[in-house]
């Protein structure tokens, strides 16, 4: 079939770069009654991505992983050019995770000459990562909308690692009647608790050691809440001190907020979302957890 290659030669995984061809393939699958599941990624795959694929594999008949480093979600001073890429390795990992199709659109095909359409959400992008990355979620929402229109999945899987992204995608899909089920998958961590991320590859040995503080902060906060602390300000203060006690760290934000609206909460009642972004050296890392108060 035109423009469809296999990797490695003869293996069952198909690689599609062409947008109309991906749309035709999606139409063909839907007509045949197949349930399509999409896992959108920026590549440089790790076990976090693989867990999403496994979940998708169970839920669908045809599993598509998209690999696209999306320039519109990077700020001008961010790491778009430097973002790690390893397409061959990604294809091998996708294949062992049972992926049927890797969709790898070209930049100029996705954003052609004269491109000017973006999706804007009024409130959710104002909080957490959106404060220091003002256009990030405009880029995320727009590229996810485009991928949904091209791959036409019945279901798409997103990681809770990027919880604000997951919440924004859910909101957009509901508000714009996309008719696709959005599923969230738990955060996959290294043995010492660091959330897996393609950006962890930027860290030096010393920075890697400091990076564990993000998860430690979330654990410490949960412990404080279990001991009866309800005041968000005090929990954030303890968390900040812990982060700054490690070399090479700089706090972007630490927030305790409502898990639905992302607005800051002063008191931790029932469930609250704690989210943080910390620079370790030049690398910006994020993590989050739902704080559960027992009483
Ligand atoms: P990315 O390639 O970083 O854009 O991530 C693609 C998808 O994988 C997003 O839905 C992420 O939330 C998810 N993801 C990335 N890292 C993890 C992780 N450690 N655990 C679970 N999901 C993850």
Image (cartoon, rainbow, N blue to C red):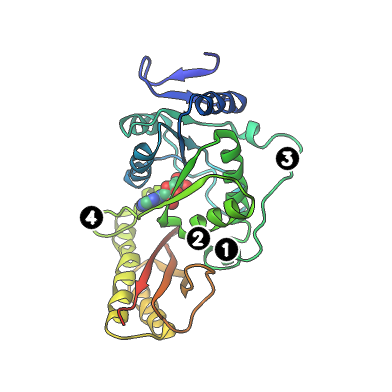
Front-most of 20 and 177? 177
Label 1: which residue?
130
* Front residue of 156 and 45: 156
Where is 24 relative to 166, above or below? above
Residue 74 seen from this side: no
Q: Which residue is painted at 54% across and 43% down in the image?
A: 81
Provide residue 195's location: percent of width, then percent of height: 34, 56
Residue beneath label 4, please?
A: 191
Quadrant hosting residue 107: top right
Circle 3 SS class: loop
Residue 6 image point, x, y percent? 42, 19
Estimate the spatial distance between the alpha carbons at disc 2 and disc 4, rounded to whole Å. Answer: 24 Å
Q: Is residue 56 above or below residue 100?
A: below
Label drawn at residue 164: 2
Q: How far separated are the C-alphas under marks 1 and 3?
A: 23 Å
Q: Which residue is mark 3?
A: 115
Q: Name the spot of residue 212 as percent of width and height, x first.
A: 30, 63
């Amino acid at each position: 079939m035109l423009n469809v290659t296999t990797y490695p030669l003869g293996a069952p995984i198909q690689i599609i770069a062409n947008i109309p061809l991906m749309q035709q393939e999606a139409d063909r699958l839907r007509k045949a009654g197949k349930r399509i599941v999409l896992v959108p990624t920026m590549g440089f795959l790790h076990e976090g991505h693989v867990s999403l694929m496994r979940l998708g594999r169970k839920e669908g008949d045809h599993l598509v992983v998209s690999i696209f480093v999306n320039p519109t979600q990077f700020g001008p001073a961010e790491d778009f050019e430097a973002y790690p890429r390893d397409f061959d390795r990604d294809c091998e990992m996708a294949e062992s995770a049972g992926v049927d199709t890797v969709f790898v659109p070209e930049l100029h095909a996705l954003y052609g000459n004269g491109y000017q359409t973006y999706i804007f959400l009024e409130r959710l992008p104002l909080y957490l990562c959106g404060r220091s990355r003002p256009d990030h979620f405009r880029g995320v929402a727009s590229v996810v909308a485009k991928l949904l229109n091209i791959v036409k999945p019945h279901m798409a899987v997103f990681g809770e690692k990027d919880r604000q992204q997951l919440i924004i995608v859910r909101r957009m899909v509901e508000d714009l009647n996309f008719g696709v089920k959005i599923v969230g998958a738990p955060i996959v961590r290294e043995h010492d608790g660091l959330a897996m991320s393609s950006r962890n590859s930027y860290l030096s040995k010393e920075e890697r050691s400091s990076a564990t503080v993000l998860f430690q902060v979330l654990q410490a906060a949960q412990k404080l809440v279990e001991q009866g602390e309800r005041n968000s300000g005090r929990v954030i203060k303890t968390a900040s001190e812990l982060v700054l006690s490690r070399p090479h760290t700089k706090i972007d934000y630490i927030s305790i907020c409502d898990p639905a609206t992302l607005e800051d909460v002063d008191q931790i009642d029932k469930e609250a979302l704690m989210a943080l972004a910390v620079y370790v050296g030049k690398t910006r890392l994020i993590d989050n957890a739902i704080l559960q108060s027992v009483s």
